[in-house]
Image (cartoon, rainbow, N blue to C red):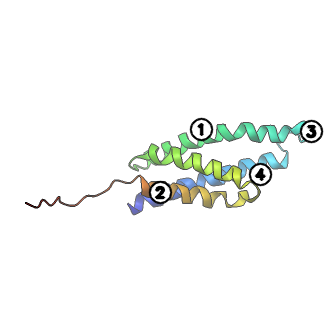
Amino acid sequence: MGRRVALAAGVGALLGLAWWGLFELLASGAVCTKDDWGCLGAFVTSIPVFAVAGSVVGGLALRSLKVSRAWLVAVPATLMAVVAMVLLLGVTFVAFAVFAALYALIAVLTGARREGPVETSG
């Protein structure tokens, strides 16, 4: 279980850094114009694109690392992290931590449970 959580947190941190980079690129105006809400429009458009792309990249990365239930970790963790980052718009520099924490949390919650022997009384 520890390996699974660590790998998920690492993938989440990398996706968080990608989110931070995307936000900084848009905020700087390097890829959009600040006239007529151009950068805001680009940001609003990029949110669902990043959510889908991040889920796919996260799922493929976890799957290639042989993490069990990779898609069950990647999809909800990415979607929750994107929502959290939209709500925390002013503090995007902690994106890697939010993504890593949510990936680790979902990895724990979706991990296989070990059940002990069933006792019967009779």
Q: Is residue 63 left or right of residue 55?
A: left
Q: Nearer the viewer, mark 2 or mark 1?
A: 1
Disc 4 marks a residue whose amino acid type is Glu
x%, y% of residue 80? 58, 49
For the N terminus, the image quarter is: bottom left
Looking at the rendered structure, the secondary structure element under dot 4 is helix
For the C terminus, the image quarter is: bottom left
Quadrant of res 64: top left
On screen, residue 62 above or below 45: below
**Where is mark 1, residue-wise?**
52
**Where is mark 3, residue-wise?**
35
Q: Is residue 109 left or right of residue 77?
A: left
Q: Camera-side residue: 1 or 76?
A: 76
User: In the image, what residue occupies the spot 89% across and 42% down?
Assistant: 34
Looking at the rendered structure, the secondary structure element under dot 1 is helix
**Where is mark 4, residue-wise?**
24
The 10 Å Cα crowd at callout 2, few under 14, some 14 to 19, many 20 or more, is many
Asked if the residue at tag 4 contacts the one at tag 1, i.e. Cβ–Cβ closer than 8 Å, the answer is: no
Disc 1 marks a residue whose amino acid type is Val
Q: Camera-side residue: 2 or 122?
A: 122
**Where is mark 2, residue-wise?**
7
Asked if the residue at tag 4 contacts the one at tag 2, i.e. Cβ–Cβ closer than 8 Å, the answer is: no
Disc 2 marks a residue whose amino acid type is Leu
User: In the image, what residue occupies the spot 66% across and 50% down?
Assistant: 18
Task: Specify which label sits upstream in the sequence, 3 or 1.
Answer: 3
Disc 3 marks a residue whose amino acid type is Asp
On screen, residue 106 above or below 38: below
Distance Cα–Cα, label 3 vs label 4: 17 Å
Task: Specify which label sits upstream in the sequence, 2 or 4.
Answer: 2
User: In the image, what residue occupies the spot 41% across and 60% down?
Assistant: 3
The 10 Å Cα crowd at callout 4, few under 14, some 14 to 19, many 20 or more, is some
